[in-house]
Image: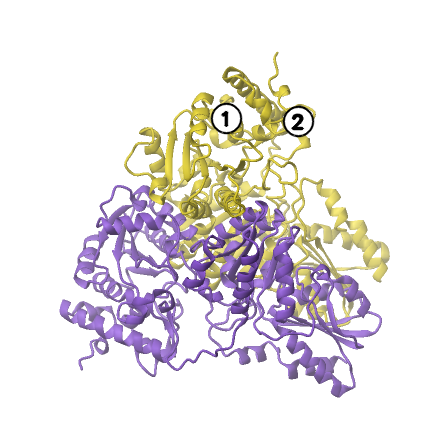
Chain colours: A purple, B yellow
Amino acid sequence: MVSYLERIDSPQDLKRMTREELKGLAAELRSAIVARVDAIGGHLGSNLGAVEAEIALHYVFDAPKDKIVFDVSHQCYVHKALTGRRGILEEGNYRDYVGFTDYRESVYDHFSVGHTSTSVSLASGLAKARDLRGSSENVIAFIGDGSLSGGIAFEGLDYVAELGTNFIVVFNDNEMSIAEPHGGIYRNLSELRRTNGACEQNLFRAIGLDYMYVEGGNDIDALVDAFTKVKDIDHPIVVHIHTEKGLGSDWAVKDKEPGHYGQPKSFKPSGVKGSNEYTRDFLEAKMAADPTVCVINAATPSAFGMNRAWREKMGSQFVDVGIAEEHAIAMISGMARGGAKPVYAIYGTFLQRTFDQLMQEFALNMSPAVILVLDAGIGTGDVTHNGTQIGSMLATIPNIRAFAPSNLNDYFALLDWAIEQTDYPVVIHVPAAVCKDDAAIDPAHADTYQIMRHGRRVALIGFGNKFRLAAAVAEGLRADGITATLIDPVIYSAVDTVTLDSLRSDHDIVVTIEDNQKDGGYGEKIAAYFGPTDMKVLTYGAAKEYVTNEPYQEVMKRYRLTEEQILEDIRRLL
Amino acid sequence: MVSYLERIDSPQDLKRMTREELKGLAAELRSAIVARVDAIGGHLGSNLGAVEAEIALHYVFDAPKDKIVFDVSHQCYVHKALTGRRGILEEGNYRDYVGFTDYRESVYDHFSVGHTSTSVSLASGLAKARDLRGSSENVIAFIGDGSLSGGIAFEGLDYVAELGTNFIVVFNDNEMSIAEPHGGIYRNLSELRRTNGACEQNLFRAIGLDYMYVEGGNDIDALVDAFTKVKDIDHPIVVHIHTEKGLGSDWAVKDKEPGHYGQPKSFKPSGVKGSNEYTRDFLEAKMAADPTVCVINAATPSAFGMNRAWREKMGSQFVDVGIAEEHAIAMISGMARGGAKPVYAIYGTFLQRTFDQLMQEFALNMSPAVILVLDAGIGTGDVTHNGTQIGSMLATIPNIRAFAPSNLNDYFALLDWAIEQTDYPVVIHVPAAVCKDDAAIDPAHADTYQIMRHGRRVALIGFGNKFRLAAAVAEGLRADGITATLIDPVIYSAVDTVTLDSLRSDHDIVVTIEDNQKDGGYGEKIAAYFGPTDMKVLTYGAAKEYVTNEPYQEVMKRYRLTEEQILEDIRRLL
């Protein structure tokens, strides 16, 4: 079989190909994407839909002089394969490259990106710099998959409309977000598709941008023609291309939401119910009992096992606001003020986008809404999605009562209380494990630490998912003849000074272990509290750094977040 | 003279007035607004332009059952005066009420609001709660003054277009932001005004919203008619009203940007150049020397003394992106990657809106752009604008080199270095004072603390604007026969462990004093570093709380941030 891909070391090689060869290349790339995802997992639908567009972009434009910025960059496999990184689609080399663009990896990748809706703004900076430098390359932002509903995308388009120089937005319209798209603009986009871009109202023109529609978003000829027309254009334009998400995988085409990201073929679902599914079922029961309980999510409902059938069953008591995390925080604040009981379920990494709304609309307004944070805690996966800083971010904000329960009993006791109470803005980290304690916390006294065992000399305070590590260290200290005090603080938005003071009479060392960054974390507050005293305090947590795809256990060792290392440190200090 | 206002204890009294009386009331309110601002200062132009609209809203709708949410709420004086709070416009009682809406103040104020662009989202939550509860009141979001360009406003409109039930957006179009508005949408808005709302492209319709245009935004009859038409409407609609900002003050009409906020007549400009003006002049010189240096601001350029004439003089080397703080961070990250030298000047309180972009686009991408933060540090003014948490927020983020210089020499040495270097994302707090030191910091060694005086027993570390307090405490300790070590750390994104270790041999107490919240601040990191040692650490900073309009010195006493109290604490520990 002819391999076109093997002939491509850079986009220059692409430019020598005939249109027929480009089409052969597209077919080859499509199979290679499916093979890669089957082998190691990865973004399937988003990559498959953009194959022809990325070929056409690199065929027409002259990267890296011309600069292409990919939104979220969960569609960049073809771009990488065409720019000297074939390995990303070659068996045996898959892991040579990360699944997102990475500025450290190649001069063709201008940014490391993994959150949505920022490509237009990032690219506008490249364009502005170009204009200040007096050069004349093309700057292209490639955006789609629901990213358009994120507020910063609108801010970017609104700015670009005033730029007055070359700027090309390729709007990759595959009719989807990760789930179905939400928001009024999707009606206009649908009408634009239906009329071949000719309908009266046009969101992009209303923002002040020039506009071109390309129905054949998976047709290399149509794309090459369109991109050739806009190359070197002297003003900003939106090229709206209609693509099919998942094209090349029957499954990903038919079932676009799960098809967005594929698991490797070797992947076997554990069949064990996780804390997210327990959460979903708990919320379902609450909603059935009270029509004012309402679950809000921002474009990632499947993370909580809230699939399409479930969402439809919940009716108006479930709202997917689309990629609009900031709106969601202000909206739940309004819902709580209006007498409803909103529960906003969100990945920690995306909650970062809402710091200001948390500060102003949520916390300052004492809105008794509930935020459930998924994947908060030390992450060692993709650098753009780790939740290592979430606890520090949230602990900075006044008024919020923030909890990191270590087990399901405490978690559901708190969640039930949080939904029903009307006094506090509440944040709860969803526990990673599904272990259960004998008893559940009494939420009415959740500002008092849970002392799991009274001991002497050494007190271990284990925060959230790291409570079990603290318990293990306590066990380890028995070998030293020490019965350590073991504390599950559960709350992390405040320090329980009464409990801390009670330790002073018969403890020499307090050890804090948290599933969070040390900087701005829980341990520092305890260390500062004991600062003027004789108490020795050892604090454990993540370093303030970005981590990219490292084995979790190795990172834990680097942070001395293992039973052996913590015991070693305590013994040195005893 | 007849006082209409005296007859109004609630909107019910308004409803009994004739149209002529309403007009008399408008004139009276307008004079009262000017008098209030002349007496104690306040938002002038934004309140004056909205007088008739707020009268008409309360005349037509039935608050507090019908719910009106004001964006930013810097136009709420009339609303307050008509809802049982006449004092806000009565001499002698002005200070009985805050200048923004405050949910604690009245059932007519649903939220405490001071940041822009959130009214649609907040109100959408009230509407969603209404629908879940099964009631049927009107929900109104009142938005204008440039707030429409903020991304969350777009997210809110996009969501509302799917709501399917009663929702009224009153878009108060006064053709202004605080400065002139920026962004492509303002061309469409201008065209809508020119065509009486009838032009082909319509941003609101493109988002999927119903639409009505009212040219007479300061005409009570036109407004009452329009609001009567949309009252109890069964779907979302935008009522676009064209108002004149500042109407009733010749100055505020003629010079709309400074007229947005008026100083009291008794106010005498000091004539002394402040650090903001020094910053502007420094940047002007840098821009003159290098065409790739570019200053970016988000809708508040006058804060840096960058008035219209100055902005025009700077040409393409100055960019006001409008109310689009998030876009600005991604854009400067792109500019830095593209070889320009961007400097983003922003109020600390508004930088909060960009946490995610700081984490992802700026810091993770190691973009060598520069952010200058104005009014970072403990604030005791309006609760929505204090910068108390900024240092904690920024210190949470990896990679950023963040500085809080205590004087202008250090500040400009760092700023000059930051603009020219290409290695780090840099944040610098603009110092409050314009004092100068004898020497300036060497930016090449800015990760080493500046030891201003070597001493023994006690070391004082004074952060940013609180360095001078640390110096005063050091002086006070001379009475105890102690020559204290005095440190100006300047950098606050990292802890200089070498310097801290050097203190261990001949110091017993380290005292940290910071112009920031204690939680997540600088002192906690130092306390944690010394946690396992015998060093005693005293940390001073603000409590984790919201503060509203309290005298600064009283708040400092509550936080023990005075020379006397800190000396007392040290002496107790010695």
Which labelled disc corresponds to residue B56?
A: 1
Who's the residue at 23% across and 60% down the image? A217
Identify residue type, mark 2: Gly
From the viewer's side, name the closer residue of B6 and A17. Answer: B6
From the viewer's side, name the closer residue of B245 and A465. Answer: A465
Outermost residue, front side: A289
Chain letter of disc 1 in the image? B
Q: Is residue A447 left or right of residue B70?
A: right
Residue A250's place in the image compared with B309, above or below, is below
Which labelled disc corresponds to residue B573?
A: none
Mark 1 or mark 2: whose residue is earlier in sequence: 1
Considering the image in quadrants, where does the N terminus of chain A appear? bottom left
Residue B350's place in the image compared with A264, above or below, is above
Instruction: State whether residue A278 appears in this view.
Output: yes
Q: Are marks 1 and 2 in contact (CB under 8 Å)?
A: no
- Return the x and y of residue B29 as percentages of the image width and height: 57, 22
Chain letter of disc 2 in the image? B
Residue B401's place in the image compared with A474, above or below, is above
Outermost residue, top side: B1
CA separation in Å, label 1 and label 2: 20 Å
- Return the x and y of residue A556 as percentages of the image width and height: 57, 78
Identify residue type, mark 1: Ala
Callout in the foreground (1, 2): 1
Considering the image in quadrants, where does the C terminus of chain A appear? bottom right
Tell me the quarter of the picture where residue A275 sits: bottom right
Name the secondary structure under disc 1: helix
- Return the x and y of residue A16 as percentages of the image width and height: 16, 69
**Residue placed under numbered mark 2 in the picture:** B87
Name the secondary structure under disc 2: helix
Who's the residue at 60% across and 44% down the image? B384
